[in-house]
Amino acid sequence: MKKIYLVMMLLGSVISCSDDTTTNLLIDDAISSGGFIRTLQFNNSDLILNDTNSTFSVDIEIQDEQQGALLDNVEVYARFKDHNPDNGDQSSSEVFVKRVEETVFTTGANNLPTTTLELTYAELIGATQILNENIQCKDQFLVRLVLNLTDGRSFSINDGASSSVIAFDTIFSSPFCYTLNIVTPIAADRFVGTYQYQSTVDGPIGPTFGLPNTVEIRVGESPNTRIFEANYIVSRLNEPARTFRFVVNCDEIIFRKNQLSSFFSWCRPEEGGGFSFGGPPILLGPDTENAVVDSNDDTTFELRFVEGYLGWDGDCDFGTVGVSVLFTKQ
């Protein structure tokens, strides 16, 4: 996607106005040699343990160099990830689940092909041939999408990707993959309200969300998903706070993957020395080890994640660094 940097450099002006034509022109230029599946919104992102009717649901939109006219179909693949190997590792290889044909899509608000992709717990169990009794809380289904065009080209994970493409809540929001957590529901009044946060393990630049401050945490698109807004420690003064998501899952708190630190990276070198905003932003995502929590006690909790997720460190050359933030209910 040859002009992704230009898109992100201009995004500050794009998001401050409602010029949809300008936005579409920038995106069209960026996809002149490809196509992508935009995540519009999650309707439900987690699956409830032992509920075969529980359904993952996400609204998606297709964009290619002909405004979606090249869409042939979207293929859905999945694999089961066992995070409770005490009874043996039941993880599966990736399998084909289904094909969503072009005829299923309708024209959405952006005059592009749009549909709601749904996957039931039962559908995923059947496709991966995992016995329900072998599935426990904290296990996951990993879903991957393939966009097939009528000219024979196909696009999936890593095809022309950058942090600003695969991150959610961007003008692209196109990771081509989703992680479905198997959860036991928590009460809607848990882990919500006003919290003060404080960095306990700083990131490579400093405290990820800056000095101690308060945020409002609310229920997200699923019973166990929680959302808050905050600014990255290094962000432009006129940049709005970004939305961050985490999942309370049994005795762990999981930071969601592919979350953008800010709209811009600040480590892009300038000629003659110094740095400027621009380039692929720093990506945030889950750490290899999640924070432990009592899901019945929401007075304090720790959120562990990494800066430089999947190696996207904003050209800052720090790689991937684990951080931790403590939240205390007010």
Image: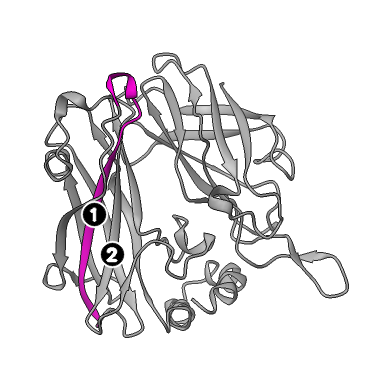
- Closer to the camera in the image, 62 or 93: 93
Q: Amino acid at mark 1?
A: Tyr
Farthest residue toward the right? 272
| Residue highlighted by disc 2 | 146
Farthest residue toward the front? 88
Residue 210: x %, y % from top left? 70, 40
Callouts 1 and 2 close, C-beta under 8 Å: yes
| Residue highlighted by disc 1 | 77
65 versus 138 height, above or below: below
Residue drawn where x is 14% and y is 39% of the image: 129
Disc with the residue nearer the chain's start (1 vs 2) = 1
Q: Is residue 68 visible to the viewer in this orientation of the structure?
A: yes
Quadrant placement of the C terminus: top right
Which image quadrant for residue 132? top left
Q: Which mark is residue 7?
A: none
Q: Is residue 61 in the magenta section?
A: no
- Closer to the camera in the image, 275 or 111: 275
Residue 256: x %, y % from top left? 44, 41
Residue 294: x %, y % from top left? 43, 15
Range of magenta residues: 70-88
40 versus 300 height, above or below: below
Q: Is residue 75 in the magenta section?
A: yes
Q: Is residue 285 left or right of residue 223?
A: right
Residue drawn where x is 24% and y is 67% of the image: 114
Which image quadrant for residue 128? top left
Element marked by disc 2: strand
Residue drawn where x is 47% and y is 50% of the image: 258
Q: Mark 2 Cα within 10 Å, few/some/many (few <14, many 20+)? A: some
- Closer to the camera in the image, 39 or 17: 39
Q: Amino acid at mark 2?
A: Val
Residue 231: x %, y % from top left? 62, 47
